[in-house]
Image (cartoon, rainbow, N blue to C red):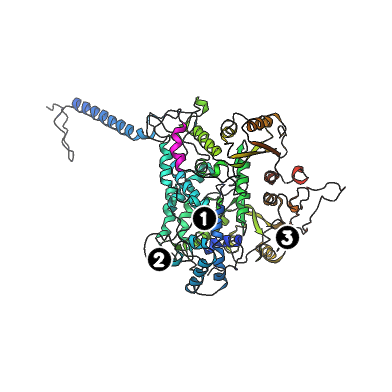
Amino acid sequence: MFQLSPGTEAERGRKRARVVSGRQSCPLSAGRSHFSARRSSESRRPSEVPAMSARGCKPSRLLLPALLLLLLWLPRLAVDAAGAAGARWNGEGTSPNLQSIFLGRCNDYRPLLSPEEQNKNCTAIWEAFKLVLDKDPCSVLPSDYDLFISLSRHSLPRDKSLFWENNHLLVTSYADNTRRFTPLCDVLYGRVGDFLSWCRQENASGLDYQSCPTAEDCENNPVDSYWKRASIQYSKDSSGVIHVMLNGSEPTGAYPIKGFFADFEIPYFQKDKITRIEIWVMHEIGGPNVESCGEGSVKVLEERLEEMGFQYSCINDYVPVKLLKCVDHSTHPDCALNSHPVPLPRGNHYFWFVVYRSCKIPFSKTHCT
Amino acid sequence: MANHRFSPVSEGEQPCCDISRKAQICLCVVLSLLVLVIIAVVTAILMWPRSPPNHKEWQGSGTTAHFGDIVLGRCYTYTQIVRPELRDKDCQKIQEVFLKSFLSKDPCDATEQDYQPLIELANQTVPCNKTVFWSKTKELAHQYTRVQQALFTLENTLLGYIADDLSWCGDSGSSEINYQSCPTRRDNCSSNPVSVFWNTVSKRFAEDACGVVHVVLNGSLNEAFDRRSTFGRVEIHNLHPKKVHTLQAWVMHDIGGVRSDSCSSSSIRDLKSIISERNITFTCQNNYRPVRFLQCVKNPEHPSCTSGI
């Protein structure tokens, strides 16, 4: 069973949502992120923590405590968790109007495709996707999405792939609807399923709108298998410089040893297409510096990449992304424009340490780029 | 003595009807003509729907492909995911009413009234102090509201979200969507469906605003405030002085760009006088810091992003 280390705060839970619940954490990239949607998915996270920490428990034993917590913790949870009292599974039910949303997004994505790829048939792509909706919700494998992927896949621009863990909003904002980067959710086969949930009823045909299985319920559920399959394809089709954004303020570690990136993306990197890998370890403004380049789980990642034969570099608080974070913290001392850290990349070809250079020293000559 | 007449019959051959060769040729010609006519008619019938003669040719690009599907999908995405408090909106009806507002109508004569039913259906309250206007700064304003999700530009409201970057038009002679071309001002057609839509929803957006409203302006242009822009023509004139007490302008300069306009320049003074005349307080800030950070993302090395502003 796919196990992730128990997450605690919202960002972690949202990433894990790709695995454990029907709610997608993959950012919606039509330039319109959805605070309330994430809030409602965020509010689901606490219920999953005790469930995850009870490792090895059978899903049926987890269901009752999970449901009780849902009802006790926040009234909103009870409202949001559709029919909590009678829900079969832990995850959100099938999104209403799934087909319309899917088709709308698919057609909406067309201008972002290269001219020769713009003749994609969204109806055919939907029909291919729909096949899993006839299957038992605990018997859907990543390979069940092969036809869907083959119809929806398209070329990815070189040097624009952006992998991430635990910094959903930041990735959406930074990617800017493919203008800067193309994370999985800005790819057609990631966009159509973004923040959606789907599954057939357990013992009948027809969709289950009440609940859908998460990884706690069963591994081979429709939504997790979708994201696994999409992640694999995204990884395989990425080329040039690969970028990875990690959260160095995440208490459980910036690089989840078991997670989507670790298990369904790194293993599928194509060595002959990738020039190098650039890791950005971002920290919350004024927030805890739990891990940085070369430390803890980041070190594990670096060693893994090295072992695989990849050239890599690691930067703490990559400046362009940090500037984006500062939009929300414009008066914080860490965001004073004249005192930017100049993160020098650390990698396996040069060992420079991150130096925080301040230009606030009076009378000093500015040498602060 | 053989009178050499063609003996048409040989083994295996079907005996033809008992007519002369000349008649046979005539018959062949007539049949061929008939076949050609049939092919022509069938082709015309098949080709007919694809290029209806009623659709005029305009200068602008046609309706966005799969317009209806996109509208419906965006509506559901917005009401179920982006702002779930609007989940009771009837997207099917909204799509229907949207189409009705321009189909079978002269695309050079669109009116505000055409869009009233749609506006009523998609009606939405934007909280006070959260309205952000923009003029010649669309990308920057949207980047800002993507980070500050409590704020709304017009394109963060349901109707704006649905219609953003789409184009559409119909024709008075047909009930079909015109996917070939749509009128623009170049066709001497300023009352085209898309322009009128945005004028109408912008007006409503301004009318509904309350508290402190903001506007992101481009100080690297000759005129940061342009009276002919939608902001200058429509929005500022439809702010309700009883509801909106302050308009806060942020005049942003391109990083490394010219500083042609700023809070003290004439176009901004012009804006200030219009606003003040309407009994609304006007405040202005050059390079409002949070938005400045956004600009710096693209130019982190630039001195104005590393040294104090």
The answer for which chain carries disc 2 is: A
The disc labelled 1 sits on which kind of residue?
Phe
Q: What residue would you read off at disc 2?
A: A202
Q: Return the mark for residue A354.
A: none
Q: Where residue A195 is drawn, which disc sits there?
A: 1
Quadrant of res A12 = bottom right
The answer to whether any part of residue A232 appears in the image is no
Picture quarter containing residue B52?
Answer: top left
Q: Please provide the residue range marked out in magenta.
A: B105-123
Q: Is residue A57 above or below residue B185?
A: below
* Spatial separation of the CA atoms under disc 3 and disc 2: 50 Å
Q: Quick one: B274 or B166, which is closer to the camera? A: B274
Label whose residue precedes the other's in the sequence (3 or 2): 2
Badge 1 sits on which subunit? Answer: A
Please rate how many residues cluster around mark 3, counting C-alpha atoms within 10 Å: few if below 14, some from 14 to 19, many from 20.
Answer: some
Under circle 2, the secondary element is loop
Mark 1 surroundings within 10 Å by alpha-carbon count, few (fewer than 14), some (14 through 19), many (20 or more)? many
Query: What amino acid type should be assigned to the residue bearing mark 2?
Result: Glu
- Residue pointed to by mark 3: A348
The residue lying furthest to the right in this view is A363
